[in-house]
Image (tube, rainbow, N blue to C red):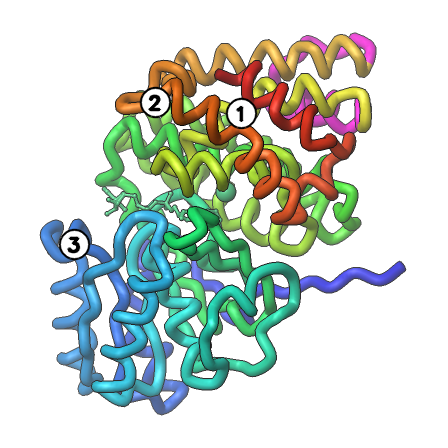
Amino acid sequence: MTSQFNIPSTIIAGAGASRELAPQLQRRGLTRVLLVTDAFMVSSGLAPKVVSDLTASGITVEVFADVQPDPSEDNVLAGFARLQDCGAQAVVALGGGSPIDCAKVIAILPHNPPPMAAFMGRHKVPNAGLPLFAIPTTAGTGSEVTKVAVITDTKRDVKMMMLDQHLLPAVALVDYELTLSMPQALTAAVGVDTLTHGIEAYVSRLATPLTDPLALSCIGLCGEHLETAWREPGNHTAREGMMLAATQGGMAFANSSVALVHGMSRPIGALFHVPHGISNAMLLPTVTRFSVAGAVARYATVARTLGWTRGGESDESAANVLVAGLEALNRRLKIPSLRSYPKMDDVRFRASLEKMADDALASGSPANNPIVPTVPEIVRLYQEAW
Ligand SMILES: NC(=O)c1ccc[n+]([C@@H]2O[C@H](COP(=O)([O-])OP(=O)(O)OC[C@H]3O[C@@H](n4cnc5c(N)ncnc54)[C@H](O)[C@@H]3O)[C@@H](O)[C@H]2O)c1
Ligand SMILES: [Fe+2]
């Protein structure tokens, strides 16, 4: 059996990497760009700094700063209208996964007309789009190196997962210094998202010899750096470690897959607007307990790679340590349970269980899990995680 591995052709990583944007655009002869970002990036001064650097290099920039968390189709269409107005030759994405995902779909629309639902699933984008330059500011989704975009269809309350090589950024500028400003709650949410990418890529039925080393390195870096980055926001070593973990996790899961945690997490995000990393974290211990029997040795390796076992134990007991360790990690990082999430609606949650389970299964991600669940099993897992 063959497997396909895609990553950006240029990844520049390390302190100050984001300053390579203008030279990277110039060496490709690109002089007119659309910057896709969000309101925080403007108010923090980061987006204006990027604009002034580009302008000083003779590059014309139009700014679309209206990206909302978990971008919707309307959000993408508004950005696309701006792209058409300014006639940009390339798209620059600055921010967390939301601006980067929004920018990915804006960049393909000139050569792939909507409806966007046609791009949902694997390998459904027919044509290449405009070149995309991605600068992540969270660590993170890994979106800067993935061929994945997640766009919410607000009419059906579905987070559409699109995976295609035409969504891949041409250039990723991975600068951990941009993540130093992340507050604790964001560091926890995006850090557990990164860990979930590493774990799901490694236990997935689509894991390959090319993705395994990246997934394990991602997991090891999370074990070493996640809690330090959370406790000490200004710790450069920990921030650099988590940025590297996020990028490696992205390379791993986009070329292996995510699995049941992400499959069940997207419907919670679509219906209840729980941030992506938080809904993953809420589900990770419960889904891991359910899935262990399908890949005991792999889950044991995850526990050992995190540094959570003493060594010499059986795979079964190492996998049990993993489940207990993930529960304890959520407590230490102050991740709320589903039930205690602010504004979570008990009655609506129960009424939505069947829809969430159907949508989770329809996304295709649960089919890659070590144990493939039925709809009633997914409903039961949501209830257990509650
Ligand atoms: N494409 C992929 O491969 C992929 C993978 C995982 C998740 N996702 C998607 O990414 C989205 C989530 O992205 P995210 O978790 O990065 O969050 P986000 O982009 O939604 O950002 C969350 C908040 O953090 C703020 N923020 C960003 N960087 C900051 C910084 N350095 N300091 C302070 N605040 C900062 C943003 O302004 C925003 O208010 C979801 O829609 C999810 O489905 C995509
Ligand atoms: Fe994720």
- Does the magenta portion include 310? yes
Alpha carbon separation for disc pair 3 and 2: 28 Å
Identity, as a three-letter code, of the amino acid under mark 3: Ala
Secondary structure, mark 3, is helix
Q: Residue visible at 47% across and 68% down?
A: 116
Which residue is more in the foreground, 205 or 80? Answer: 80
Q: Disc 1 vs disc 2: Cβ atoms closer than 8 Å?
A: no
Q: Earlier in the sequence, mark 3 or mark 2?
A: 3
Which circle, 3 or 1, is nearer the viewer? 1
Q: Is residue 346 left or right of residue 9?
A: left
From this view, report whether residue 198 is shown above or below residue 315. Answer: below
| Residue under numbered circle 2 | 345
Q: From the top left corner, tell me how far across and down residue 186 is, in percent.
A: 31, 34
Of residues 6 and 84, the one nearer the viewer is 84
Vertical relation: 125 (above or below) 290 = below
Work out whether 385 lies above or below 369: above
> Could you say where residue 347 lies in the image, as x and y percent from the top left?
39, 20
Q: Is 99 situated left or right of 304 in this image?
A: left
Tell me if label 3 and label 2 are in contact, CB under 8 Å: no
Crowding near pointer 2: few (<14 within 10 Å), some, many (20+)?
some
Q: Nearer the viewer, mark 3 or mark 2?
A: 2
- Point out which mark residue 283 bears: 1
**Residue at 56% across / 61% down in the picture?**
120
Within 8 Å: ligand 1 and the Cβ of disc 3?
Answer: yes
Q: Amino acid at mark 2?
A: Asp
The crowd level at tag 3 (other Cα within 10 Å; few <14, some 14-19, many 20+) is: some
Q: Which residue is mark 3?
A: 39
Query: What is the C-alpha distance between the residues marked 3 and 1?
Result: 29 Å
